[in-house]
Image (cartoon, rainbow, N blue to C red):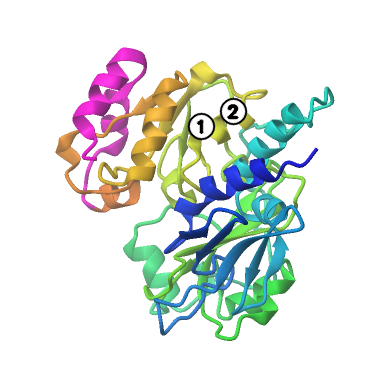
Amino acid sequence: MSVLFLEVKYARMLGPRLDRWVIKKDSPFHGNSRCPVCGDSYTNKAKKRFHIIERGGVLFCKCFNCDYTNSLVNYLKAFHTDLFNEFLFEKYRVEGKDDAPVITTPNVVETRITSVPSLGIQLVSELDETHACRVLVRDRQLPDYPFMYAPQFFKFASKYFEDFDKVKKDEARLIIPFLDKKSKIYAFQGRDLSGKSDRKYITVIVNKKMPLVFGIDRIDVSKTCYIVEGPLDSLFVDNCLAAVNSGLTATAKRLSPVINKTQVVLVYDNEPRNPEIVKQYKEAIADGYKIVIWPASVGPLKDINDMKLAGVNFMNVIKKNTFSGVMASLEFQKWKKV
């Protein structure tokens, strides 16, 4: 039985996460955006050379800049694990199979870094005090963590994702390693240093058997667990994980065998005018999760790092503005601007 209709459904769900996404044709399906793999043109932001197209009853991704080519399903598996997992479960239901895949999650326990992990590149703490990467870490007031520096990010990352070899223009990035409970690196994220990149963050998977969640090295499953969007924000919050995207409910569900739903608090970015984020808030409330609804007192501050820099006692704000059920719905209506 063909599941093309299901692939199209998930291509539409993926679309809002892609830059300058448009659906050019419904049948056969054809979607177009800037390339999320290579970032597309650095000089012409109007160029959109990433396509999701139907061929032989299957959707494929193709970039005519970096030549990235893969099925939509494999692309989701590599870059949008939450959508990939949801797709798998729905596919098995549609096909009427009883042996639906089980997504395993390692035992998540609090641990300490016993040794500095290595990816063969320099630690930020070893850089000169005036180095741009070290200045960024200091200026953002980021907590102590084994951040690293990649002067040629795509060349470095191509060891783990060969398609990066085809990126023509390289760039320097801050490297944020994802550590497991044994302090081994299973993924890393590269943050743009120039402020000019179309992709501020690029995530690369080292160990595909691990869930793409940041912070499992230091979480205590017996306490309240906060889930935020980005790794850097999570470093400021006690007992916190980062979903690496805005799919916080999908992350919470994947971790449900280890972390009880009643212990989870979802902390989305403060973007009341962003339709996609507003939708995520609404779905989280409908699913019965505890969620932080940011008060007007934080103003236009978007995330926890911004609040830290502004001197806001964000943990106090989070604890006083965590809601669920009817109260969450009422506060949500006051918060949203779309």
Callout 1 secondary element? helix
Residue 224 visible, this orientation: no
Tag on residue 253?
2
User: Residue 275, percent across and down?
Assistant: 33, 44
Q: Nearer the viewer, residue 155 or 19?
A: 19
Callout 2 secondary element? helix
The amino acid sitting under disc 1 is Thr
Asked whether disc 2 touches disc 1, contact meaning CB atoms under 8 Å apart, the reply is: yes
* Classed neighbour count for the residue bearing mark 1: other residues with Cα under 10 Å, few (<14), some (14–19), many (≥20): many
Quarter of the image where one finds residue 276: top left
- Identify the residue at horizontal 28%, vertical 52% (top origin): 306
Range of the magenta residues? Answer: 310-338
Q: Nearer the viewer, residue 161 or 108?
A: 161
Residue under label 1? 249
User: Residue 148, percent across and down?
Assistant: 56, 67
- Relative to 61, say whether 210 is above or below: above
- Identify the residue at horizontal 77%, vertical 57% (top origin): 56
User: Residue 136, percent across and down?
Assistant: 38, 68
Q: Nearer the viewer, residue 274 or 197?
A: 274
Residue 209 visible, this orientation: yes
Give the main secondary structure of the magenta stretch. Answer: helix
**Quadrant in the picture for the C terminus:** top left
User: Residue 130, percent across and down?
Assistant: 38, 79
* Classed neighbour count for the residue bearing mark 2: other residues with Cα under 10 Å, few (<14), some (14–19), many (≥20): some
Tag on residue 83?
none
Question: Magenta includes 311?
Answer: yes
- Relative to 301, say whether 146 is above or below: below
The amino acid sitting under disc 2 is Lys
Q: CA distance from mark 2 to mark 1?
A: 6 Å
